[in-house]
């Protein structure tokens, strides 16, 4: 009947709207993660430049808000060439 067709259509629209909202949330989360990754990459690039310019490890840790482990890893990769 017409009523059951309307009900089916409403259910379909509800599922579709839910899927769209989930997809939008996933896209927003992916964009946020990409921005975080880009920021981290830029920070590591700055830290590497500072190492090349002979800044002290503690200065780099402080300025770039990196862990000593991250800075020492960068330093090791710089020394390897």
Image: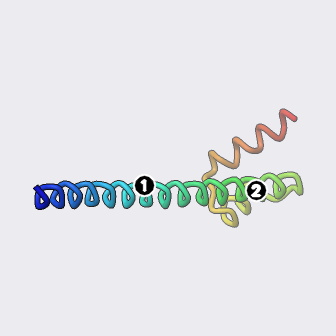
Residue 71, image x, y percentages: 69, 49
| Mark 1: few/some/many CA within 10 Å (<14, 14-19, 20+) | few
The type of colouring in the image is: rainbow
The quadrant in which residue 50 appears is: bottom right
Which residue is at a point 59% across and 58% down the rendered structure image?
36
From the viewer's perspective, tell me whether residue 35 is left or right of residue 51: left
Residue 78, image x, y percentages: 83, 41
Which residue is at a point 49% across and 56% down the rendered structure image?
27
Residue 47's disc number: 2
Name the residue tied to disc 1. Answer: 23
CA separation, marks 2 and 1? 36 Å
**Mark 1 element type:** helix
Which residue is at a point 59% across and 55% down the rendered structure image?
34
Residue 32, image x, y percentages: 53, 60
Choose between 7 and 53: the one closer to the eye.
7
Choose between 4 and 70: the one closer to the eye.
4
Which residue is at a point 21% across and 56% down the rendered structure image?
11
């Amino acid at each position: 009947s017409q009523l059951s067709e309307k009900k089916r259509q409403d259910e379909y629209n509800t599922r579709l709207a839910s899927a769209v909202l989930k997809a939008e949330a996933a896209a927003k989360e992916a964009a946020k993660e990409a921005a975080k990754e880009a920021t981290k990459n830029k920070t590591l690039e700055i830290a590497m430049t500072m190492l090349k310019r002979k800044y002290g490890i503690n200065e780099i840790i402080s300025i770039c808000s990196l862990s000593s482990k991250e800075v020492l890893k960068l330093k090791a990769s710089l020394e390897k060439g």
